Amino acid sequence: MIKYSKQDFGDDFDWGVTISSYQVEGAHDLHGRGMSIWDKFSHQGKRIEDGSDGTIACDFYHRYEEDIDIVKSLNLKNFRFSLAWPRILPNGTGAVNQAGIDFYNKVIDYCLAKGVTPWLTLYHWDLPQVLEDKGGWTNRMIVNCFKEYADVCSRAFGDRVKNWIVINEPFTYTALGYLFGYYAPGKFGINNYIPAVHHSTLCQAEGARVIRRNVPDANIGTSVGCSHVSPASDAPRHVAAAKRIDVMFNRIHIEPLLGMDYPIRDLPALERIEKYIQPYDPELIKFDFDFIGVQNYYSLVAYDVPLVPYIGALIKPFHKLNRPLTANGWEVYPEGIYKILKQFGEYPIKKLMVTENGAAFYDKVQNGKVHDKKRVEFLQKYIGQVLRAKNEGVNIGGYFVWSLMDNFEWKAGFKSRFGIVHTDFKTQRRIIKDSGRWIREFLEE
């Protein structure tokens, strides 16, 4: 039994749900869409655990009306989805694909017709492959390309869309995509990672400025993936290791935007970024965002290991005995989201939004229903910790569940199910899980 209600969050608190383009749309080669880095990456050998890809995914491209109807039925008034850069600018820049613009116009208009507020994310990791062929996020040319993309999108949709998220979780695609090679585009090495970080930081601010120019009354934010980090013990070397991990996971992508510069002192390997900073960049990377999106899934424990390149530390899931784990092996630690919200609440940020939070579990369809008790309990406990932080003075303006439906979950393919709606990837049948039903009841007017 939960001890809070929707009313405890206030009438102006935004409740929503999130999806992303490559994970749900499908229609990978229809109507002029270009190739993305995930199209190429997912077809390279055994990159994806179950051998799947986003070629069809959830077929949102053809089923968006059904899915938006589900959002409406769950009493969720805000629907966050991303725009596919290759669908709008197949060559990354230049000629606009009108069919792509038309598709997103239909999605936006249907949302509005149903009384659902659209929240657009410009970039959720599906970079046009033609830009990656030129270096992608490691090449400074990406900044002008991204500004052009932001200009096209904000001009096309800004008359109806007022809520914008510039970039989704730069840590994930820079670290996992350009440092470790685990995600698309599959590059390795710090000499790829460092420029990708700086160019992503520039694009967050420059993209926001473009939106502000074209949509003066827009509510503009950007989102960062973040995790509460604890040292393995109180030993100074582990405490120092935790600080370095905190820089990489939490601080590097937010502090420069706030005019605080890169936290090089706490992670000396970042000194390499200085060669990519041009004289005017310290001003260009600052922007007065209306909100920052916080995205939290797990907490971490850090160990000092001097032989580990660059960061000199190892990280492990923050496991304690007798705590449940998700299907990904992540510990269910609700206080982790409270702690990271409190940490980000110390920054000079106008407002925080929880733009992603959720969990994957081993769901089963039984007699046409999905009884995902663990996800219900997860959401109840994590939302309770969001309220705790809010009641302690952290300015939190909303909570978005990841994800509306089971989808293509990147490296894990279709094995990792985060949805509050079950997707049968063969028939594309949707089934609202018990977690979705709980949200519907919780948000009942």
Image: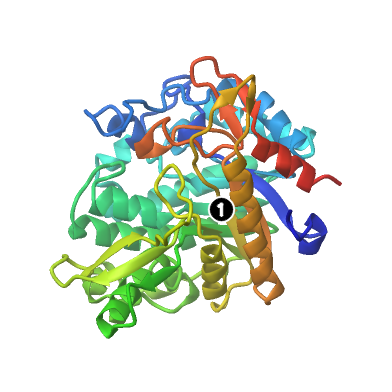
According to the picture, the residue beneath numbered tag 1 turns out to be 165
Q: Give the side of residue 195 with respect to residue 208, left or right.
A: left
Q: Quick check: can you spot residue 354?
A: yes
Q: Residues within 10 Å of mark 1 (few under 14, many from 20)?
A: many
Is 287 situated above or below 98?
Answer: below
Residue 10, image x, y percentages: 80, 62
Residue 91, image x, y percentages: 37, 34
Question: Residue drawn at (42%, 72%), measured in percent from left and top?
Answer: 256
* Picture quadrant where residue 17 is located: top right
Q: Give the side of residue 60 with respect to residue 392, left or right.
A: left
Question: Residue drawn at (29%, 80%), measured in percent from left and top?
Answer: 240
Question: Residue drawn at (32%, 54%), measured in percent from left and top?
Answer: 174
In this view, the residue in front, 379 or 352, is: 379
Residue 215, image x, y percentages: 65, 54
* Picture quadrant where residue 373 is located: top right
* Picture quadrant where residue 52 is located: top left
Is 443 situated above or below 333?
Answer: above
Q: Secondary structure at mark 1?
A: strand
Is 274 situated above or below 57?
Answer: below
Q: Residue furthest right?
A: 445
Q: Residue furthest bottom?
A: 236
Q: Give the side of residue 253 with respect to residue 333, left or right.
A: left
Question: Residue drawn at (69%, 65%), measured in percent from left and top?
Answer: 387
Is 60 situated above or below 344?
Answer: above
Q: Give the side of residue 28 with respect to residue 122, left or right.
A: left
Q: Quick check: can you spot residue 155?
A: no
Residue 384, image x, y percentages: 67, 61
Mark 1 is on which residue type?
Ile
